[in-house]
Amino acid sequence: MNETINTLMTRQSVRSFKDTQIEEGDLKTILEAGLKASTAMNRQSWHFTVVQNRDLLDTISQAVAQVMRNTEVPSLVERASQKSFSCFHHAPTVIFLSSDKTIYSLADCANAAQNMCVAATALSLGSCYVASFAQAFSIAEGKKLLGSFNLPEGYEPVFSVALGYTEGSLPPAKTREWKVSYIR
Ligand SMILES: Cc1cc2nc3c(=O)[nH]c(=O)nc-3n(C[C@H](O)[C@H](O)[C@H](O)COP(=O)(O)O)c2cc1C
C-alpha cells in the first residue's frame, strides 16, 4: 500500500504512554506538519503551545477532574476520582492548539491537530487528539493557568495533541461506518 495511505489508515488514538520524552527533531517535524495543514484563506488562525512540563499538565488535569466531579454525573465523578486520571493520558508532550476565534479558526486548528496525529504515526509515535482539557478553563482555578500560556491577545486553546512513545499494545482499531452516498 502507498506509504501515506498506510499511515492514514493505521493512525489510532493512543492512551498509554511511556515516560520517555520524544526526540526534539520529531517534535519539530510534528509542529511543521501542523503548520502545513490546510487553513482558510491562509490565515493560519492558530497558535501552538508545546507543554512538556509535567506539573502544568497535571494541574490542568486536576482542574478537569474538578469540573467532572462538579457535574455529579456518576460515571464522570468515578472517572475523575481515579488516582490515575489524566485527561492527557500522562503523555510527556502535549501540543495545545489555540484559536483566534475567527470564523474558520476551529477548522484550521482541527486540520493542524489531525496533521500532527498523522505525522506522529508516521514517526512511530503515539498520539491522542484531546479536547476535554478545555473544561479546565471554565473554573477559576483553571482560568488562572491560562496565563502561563502567554497566548497572543484574543486566542483560546481549543484542541490538544498528546504525544509520546506508546506503552504496551494498542486496543483493536475502532471501525468506521461507511457514511457515504454517491450522486453520479
Ligand atoms: C475534536 C476531538 C476531540 C477529542 N477529544 C478527546 C479527548 O478529550 N480525550 C480522548 O481520549 N480522546 C479524544 N478524542 C479522540 C477520539 O475519541 C478518537 O479519535 C475516536 O474515538 C476514534 O478513535 P481513533 O482515533 O482510535 O480512531 C478526540 C477526537 C476529536 C476529533
Image (cartoon, grey):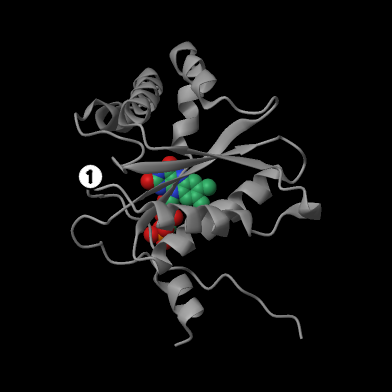
Q: Nearer the viewer, residue 49 or 24?
A: 24
User: Measured from the top left, where is residue 93 in percent x and y?
Assistant: 37, 43
Q: Is residue 137 above or below residue 112?
A: above
The answer to whether residue 95 of the structure is visible from this angle is yes
Q: Is residue 21 above or below residue 174?
A: above
Position of the C terminus by quadrant: bottom right
Residue found at the very far top of the displayed protein: 140
Task: Find disc 1 in the rendering and name its residue.
Answer: 19
Q: Give the image quarter of residue 169.
A: bottom left
SS type, badge 1:
loop
Position of the N terminus by quadrant: bottom left
Q: Give the residue type at disc 1.
A: Asp
User: Measured from the top left, where is residue 80 in percent x and y?
Assistant: 29, 28
**Residue shown at the point (47%, 63%) measured from the top left:** 119
User: Measured from the top left, where is residue 106 in percent x and y?
Assistant: 66, 44
The answer to whether residue 11 of the structure is visible from this angle is no
**Residue shown at the point (45%, 24%) measured from the top left:** 136
